[in-house]
Amino acid sequence: MTRSAIFVGCAALPEGDGDEAAVLPALADLGFTVSWAAWDSAADFASADIVVLRAAWDYPERREEFLSWCEDVPGLSNPAAVVRWNTDKAYLGELLDAGVPAVPVEIVPPGEKPRWPKKPFVVKPSVGAGGRGAARFSSAGADAEQHLRALHDEGRTGLVQPYQSSVDTQGEIAVTYFGGVYSHAFTKFAPLESSMDTSGLYREERLAAAVPAPEVRAVAEDALDAACGLLGILRAELLYARVDLVRGDDGRPLVLELELTEPSLGFRHADAGAPLRFASAVRQQLA
């Protein structure tokens, strides 16, 4: 049986950034034909058996339009309800409330002022991707206030988080799951001072294959379980998930972000079996 899949990009990257190159033949081996289309294009998404969000990285500037599109697409992975919850980083507060070890976060809507941390911190929009709109500050002052004010002037809610210095030496570790099952991990070095990619959608990163320490993987599992509990779904209902973690000042792993919408999955830095596992997970979503 031949089935069709559409991988979803955006106008600037209608065929993604190349990370999924090895996935296409793996899906073809299972009888899938795969095409790419920008989410806001005239493609016939309803005709596909499954529509997979991959590089829709321009959604922050058009979130409500993007969410409306998601809700109109049958066979979307991950589902629209997951996307709505996950595209606002206020979910980090819900994970903290659920007992997940995560980087502390203060959500600052327009018109409100934060309690500035005593140590270096990051200010970023609650709806954002690729590091756009994020900045690090060594202390409270006019620069941080101006940055937050600029977000508020655009009608955007801000997030304030203490900066984790381990990012400078160890980077982040991204733990990846397909169909709720662990697949692989990779490290990411993406300093906030690094330049933007030529697409203008994300900061340039250095990635490398990694094996997560047991305590890192345990926190990632807890985060995924908690998210599914909050969403009222099974882990198997998520085609993909990526948990980004950093080490806190005491060395313990902390969730920095939980990516359920359109994360890069690091296939170029994974073992040869990762594309096969992803293809199998795609098929499982249609079972």
Image: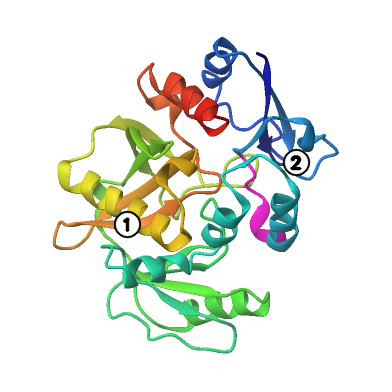
Considering depth in this image, is 41 or 29 the residue closer to the camera? 29
Determine whether the residue tagged by mark 2 lies in a helix, strand or loop. loop
Calculate the distance from the C-alpha at mark 2 to the C-alpha at mark 1. Answer: 30 Å
Q: Earlier in the sequence, mark 2 or mark 1?
A: 2
- Disc 2: CA contacts within 10 A as few (<14), some (14-19) or many (>=20): some
Q: Residue 36: name its quadrant.
A: top right
Specify the label residue 141 is tagged with. Answer: none
Q: In screen coordinates, is 256 left or right of 43?
A: left
What percent of the width, then of the height, locates residue 232?
46, 58
Q: Which residue is mark 1?
A: 255
The reply to whether residue 38 is in sight is yes
Q: Name which residue lies at 21% across and 60% down.
A: 248
What percent of the width, then of the height, locates residue 138?
34, 72
What percent of the width, then of the height, locates residue 118?
28, 80
Considering depth in this image, is 164 or 175 the residue closer to the camera? 175
Q: Name which residue lies at 64% across and 58% down.
A: 60
Q: Name which residue lies at 17% across and 41% down.
A: 213
Q: In screen coordinates, is 160 left or right of 99?
A: right
Q: Which residue is mark 2?
A: 11
Quadrant, the N terminus: top right
User: The magenta stretch spans which residues?
Assistant: 55-62
Inspect the magenta stretch and tell me whether residue 61 lies in it.
Answer: yes
**Label 2 amino acid?**
Ala
Q: Is residue 50 above or below residue 200?
A: above
Q: Name which residue lies at 78% across and 31% down.
A: 47
Can you name the residue that lies furthest to the left here?
Answer: 250
Q: Is residue 46 above or below residue 113?
A: above
Quadrant, the C terminus: top right
